Image: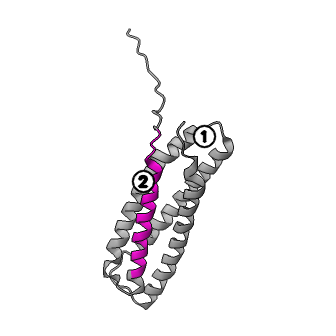
């Protein structure tokens, strides 16, 4: 009978990347510009391009979230294992972002329509302002409180 051995491998740690936070901040700027343009189109009642712009926004937003989850959060959570207070803050940010992401996806899906009447226009602008306020607040908090935690170990 041949004996088999199993090797338990620890997950490979994510390496520190000095360019990550500047890249994430550039993403924020790009997302804000695109979201602002969507709002400008809607305010002028030029809805023809809004569904496609929303899809583009969602695609960029999801790419940003993947980079944050895989490269930022995994690194910082690993680095903060011995700092329960900051670890709790990081995990709270991560959970909150997941909830915001669901809201953004729902907003995009809701307005993948071809006809915007007066009622839809008003609902869109109300939803747009609510989503925009959440995103602006989140970006400000990430850049002020969360991103400074990303440091070389």
Predominant secondary structure, magenta span: helix
Task: Give the numbered dot on residue 23.
Answer: 2
**Residue 80 shown left or right of residue 108 in the figure:** right
Residue 35 falls in image quadrant? bottom left
In the current view of this chain or complex, which residue is farthest to the top? 1
Asked which secondary structure carries label 1, the reply is loop
Report the front residue among 96 and 21.
21
Q: Is residue 23 magenta?
A: yes
Please provide the residue range marked out in magenta.
16-40
Q: What residue does disc 1 label?
A: 80
Looking at the rendered image, the quarter that the C terminus falls into is top right
| Mark 1 or mark 2, earlier in chain | 2
Report the front residue among 58 and 28.
28
Task: Name the colouring of the figure.
Answer: one colour
Looking at the rendered image, the quarter that the N terminus falls into is top left
Residue shown at 47%/86% (left/top)? 122
Between the C-alphas of marks 1 and 2, the distance is 22 Å
**Residue 118 shown left or right of residue 130 in the figure:** left
Q: Position of residue 80 (x, y in %)?
A: 60, 40
Residue shown at 47%/40% (left/top)? 16
Category of crowding for the residue at label 2, using alpha-carbon neighbours closer than 10 angstroms: few (below 14), some (14–19), many (at least 20):
few
Residue shown at 58%/47% (left/top)? 149
Q: Is residue 115 magenta?
A: no
Residue shown at 51%/43% (left/top)? 74
Residue 77 falls in image quadrant? top right
């Amino acid at each position: 009978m041949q004996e088999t051995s199993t090797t338990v491998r620890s997950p490979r740690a994510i390496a520190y990347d000095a360019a990550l936070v500047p890249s994430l901040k550039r993403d924020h700027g790009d997302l804000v510009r695109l979201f602002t343009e969507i709002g400008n189109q809607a305010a002028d009642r030029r809805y023809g391009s809004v569904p496609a712009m929303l899809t583009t926004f969602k695609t960029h937003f999801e790419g940003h979230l993947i980079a944050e989850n895989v490269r930022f959060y995994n690194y910082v959570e690993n680095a903060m294992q011995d700092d329960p207070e900051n670890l709790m803050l990081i995990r709270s940010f991560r959970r909150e972002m997941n909830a915001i992401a669901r809201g953004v996806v729902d907003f995009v899906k809701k307005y993948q329509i071809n006809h915007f009447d007066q009622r839809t226009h008003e609902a869109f602008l109300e939803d747009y302002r609510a989503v925009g306020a959440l995103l602006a607040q989140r970006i400000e908090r990430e850049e002020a409180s969360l991103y400074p935690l990303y440091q070389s170990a």
